[in-house]
Amino acid sequence: MEEEEEEEWLLESLRLYNDLHVFELQDPTRVIEWTRDKSICVAGYESGRKNEVLQLLLPQTLYAKENQGLCPDRDFKVEHGGFSDRPVCQLKHMPETSLLVTSGPPDSSLQVWRMELDETDVIKPLSTIPTAHGDDRTWAKMAAAFSKSARILHGQRINNIQVTEVESGKTVFMADSTDPDEVATLDFLDEATLLACTAGGQLYFADTRQPRGVPGASEEAHLPGALGGQKWCAGVERGLPDKPLVARLSSGGHVVLTDFRKASRPMKVARCPVATPGLLGAEFLAVSLAPRLGNCLAVSGFDGTVHVYDTQNWDSSGQEAKPVFIHKGHIFSSTAHVGDPPLVTAHAWHPCKPRTVLSAARDGSLHVWDWSEPRTAS
């Protein structure tokens, strides 16, 4: 039966995808970070071993002007590489530099790396950035600042969020808060405003121009539909400055869209038909807003799929949403046919191609796909 389903999916792929490229990494990754429009970074996240940190050049077929069609390929080229003594759970590239910053257990410190621009092609560890008042219970979440100097936003909890200059190690912002809520997502809304989404789904904002800033919570009395008790994460709209949206995703499959200029009440709420609502831990939960495709977002981390939704007709009622596309490739391309399909560990939108998405799964598969117009998908 599984072979029949795989055959059916392969036949459907000719209709559902404009492009579909299937790759295999040596080790699974939970980070897909763009360093240029033709390069990404990936990294292993296994405990108790050295993990590779790699910058990969995309195959030429993926940045040629014409679509290349369905093309299983294995020619990612390693541009730079290094090894981390700890799992890499998050990785950020400092814009317009060769610097990378990573975080992961067993503590809240950050590791700074440089991609050496010489014959060695080595990603070299440079320094460590501590998180003030950090602990060993969780690793620090991060975001790269928009500023000209390389700065990183990081923290485990609302009361230890800070912004640090990467090269000097100087702290330029520290949250003045006693709130111990665990941070699930950190990001910048603009050059001065930071966003924090807690694991409980609460949004906090702060102005980093104040060295001792006080994060202000959004004025929501509660999340729609009494959605407390679930794990949450968030994603920020990048491509449309006139629509500063924040999307939150819960382990129960609820998506909440908020205009941060009017954070007192959610703008849109929907429930996604996920396979495992109430997901415990929600380790790989992810939501992202398409940078070049208005009203589109993607969610993953529930199973071996990535769901894409068009939010244009959503309202605040919390209705069930229907995906315009479901990428099932990791289920059928997995080399491990025994047991459950591999869980999707990360996804990322292409910065220039509107409907192109990269996704990775726990079996080491890495896919690049561009789906057809929504009307052709089912």
Image: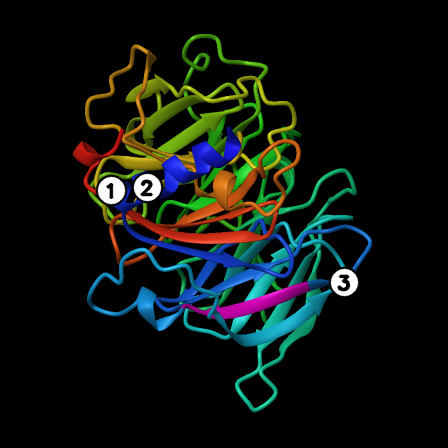
- The three-letter amino acid code for the residue at tag 1 is Arg
Residue 10 location (% of width, % of height): 37, 43
The residue that mark 1 highlights is 15
Compared to 52, does 126 lie above or below? Answer: below
- The tag earlier along the polypeptide, 3 or 2, is 2
Q: Position of residue 295 (x, y in %)?
A: 23, 35
Give the residue number, with chain letter if any, for mark 2. 11
Tell which circle, 3 or 1, labels the residue nearer the N-terminal end: 1
Question: Observer-nearest residue: 339 or 202?
Answer: 339
Q: Is residue 324 left or right of residue 193?
A: left
Q: Which residue appears at 32% of the width and 57% of the height?
A: 351
Does residue 108 appear in this view?
yes
- The Cα–Cα distance between marks 2 and 1, rounded to whole angstroms, is 8 Å
**In front of the other: label 2 or label 1?**
2
Q: Residue at x 63, y 61 (%)?
A: 26
Verify CB contact (< 8 Å) between mark 3 and mark 1.
Answer: no
- Mark 1 neighbour density, 10 Å: few (under 14) some (14–19) many (20 or more): few
Residue 25 occupies quadrant: bottom right
Instruction: Please say whether residue 359 is one of the residues in the magenta stretch.
Output: no
Type of secondary structure dominating the magenta stretch: strand
x then y, percent, for residue 120:
61, 87
Label 2 neighbour load within 10 Å: few <14, some 14-19, many 20+: few
Marks 2/1 in contact by CB < 8 Å: the verdict is yes
- Residues drawn in magenta: 52-58
User: What is the distance, in whole Å, between disc 3 and disc 2 at their CAs?
Assistant: 40 Å
